[in-house]
Amino acid sequence: MTALDEAILDDVTALDAADPAQMLRAVASSAAQIRMAATASSEAGLTAVSELGRPRALVVAGMGGSGISGDVLAAIAGPASPVPVFVHRGPGLPAWVGAADLVVAVSCSGSTEETLNAADEAVRRGVPLVGVGRADSPLGRRCELARAPMVPVTMHVGPRATLWGLVTPLLFLAARLGLVDLGDRDEALEQAAVRLEQVAEMCRPDRELFVNPAKTLALDLAGTLPMVWGGGQVGPVAAYRMVCQLAENAKYPAVPGVLPEAHHNQVVALDGVLAGGSADADIFRDRVDDEAWLRLRLVLVDDESGSPSRADVSEELAESRGVAVSRLRTEGSSPVERLASVVGLIDYATVYFALAQGIDPTPVAPIDALKKRLESAAAARP
C-alpha cells in the first residue's frame, strides 16, 4: 500500500514547500495559457497558411508532453473532420507525407531532437510547415529559414504543464482550415478558459480535502493500480493524459483504455488477482476489505451521451466484483470545454498525489538519464 501523508493536502505551507518548482501554480495557469496562445496564434501569420487551401492531411510532429497536443486536436476534430489528423511521434516523417499535406512541428522547448528531424524532413520534401514552441530555439530558427510561421509558446515548468499553450495554436489553425468549429470569434477557447478557472477554484490548495475533488481523487488512487478508461469523443485522450500525468508527476503506473474496445479485452482484469478474485470465485462476494498490497481501481473518464452508457455498464460490472470506481464526467457545451473540465481536475489530482507521497512532481530523472545515454551512444557510433 502506498504510504500517503494525507495531512499535507490541507497544509498550504507544506504543499508549497514540497513543490519547489511550483507545479501547482503552473497547473493554475491553464486558463491564462489559452488566452495568451490565442493572441500569439492570431499574430503569427497562420492565416497565410489557411490561404494555401485545405491540406490532404494535417500531420502533428511531437513527443511526450508536446506530442499529446496532437492527440487533443485529433480528438476534437473527430470523425467529422474533412481531412485526417495524424500524430507522428518519432524522427523523420511517414513516406506518404508530401507537398499536399501540412506538418505542424510542436516542441515546447523548441529543441526536441525527433521533432527537429521531422521539421527538417518537411522542409526537404517541400511540405508546408508550422512551428509551435519556444521562439528563440532550434525549431524557431528552422522556421525562420524556411519562412514558415512560428507560434511562440512560454513554457510553464515543463511541457506537460503547458498543454493548453501548445494545444491552442493547433486548434486555432485547424479552425481556419475548417477542421474544427470553435464558434464565432473562437468562443470555444474562451469557454474552455472559463471552465479551467472554475476547476482551479474548486481544486485550489487552500480548499479543504472534503470539498476538493482533486485531493479526493488523489487519495482514492493510493494503493491501487488505476485502469483508466475513456469513453465518448474526448474521454479517451483525457484518459491517456491521466496515465501520462500519473507517470510524470506522481511517478506512478496506470493502464489506459478506450471504450468500447476495453470491453473486449481489459474488462477481464476485473476477474483477476488485483481485483481480489477470479472467474471461479463468487462474483457477489464483497472483496473491498480483502487484504492486498495493490488493488485494481477503475477510473472512468466519461464523455458519452445516452443512457445507459458504456461507462454506466462498466461501473456496474466493476462494483459487482468489488472493484472501486472513480467516475469523471465531462461538462461543457463544446468538445474543447468538455476536455478542459476533466483535464483540469486530472492535472491537479496527479500533482496532489505526488505531494502526498512525498514526491516532487517536477523532476523527470529517468527521461534525463535516457537522453544522456542516447546522446552518448550516438556520439560513440563510427
Image (tube, rainbow, N blue to C red):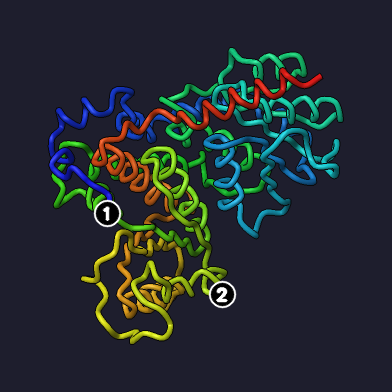
In the image, taking residue 346 as reference, residue 128 lies left or right, namely right
- Comparing 272 with 336, the one in front is 272
Q: Distance between the residues labelled 1 and 2?
A: 30 Å
Q: Is residue 195 visible?
A: no
Name the residue located 75 percent from the left edge and 37 percent from the top edge.
Answer: 102
Using residue 25 as the reference point, say whether residue 336 is left or right of it. right
Disc 2 is placed on an element classified as: helix
Q: How crowded is mark 1: few (under 14 residues within 10 Å), some or many (20 or more)?
A: few
Q: Percent position (x, y) of residue 35?
A: 43, 31
Instruction: Give the vertical position of 21 relative to 89 (above or below).
Output: above
Asked whether 114 or 370 is in front, the reply is: 370
Identified by mark 2, the residue type is His
Residue displayed at 69% across by 24% down: 377
Residue 205: percent from the left, percent from the top? 20, 37
The location of residue 327, given as percent across then percent down, is: 34, 63
Front in this rendered view, residue 368 or 47: 368
7 horizontally vs 85: left or right: left
Question: Residue 1 has which mark?
Answer: 1
| For marks 1 and 2 on the same chain, the one whose residue lies earlier in the sequence | 1
Quadrant of res 87: top right
- Which corner quadrant holds the N terminus? bottom left
Whether 274 is drawn above or below 103: the answer is below
Say the numbered circle drawn on residue 264.
2
Q: Can residue 29 be seen in this view?
A: yes
Q: How crowded is mark 2: few (under 14 residues within 10 Å), some or many (20 or more)?
A: few
Residue at 34% from the left image edge and 72% from the top image edge: 276
Q: Locate residue 119: give its quadrant.
A: top right
Q: The C terminus appears in which quarter of the rendering? A: top right
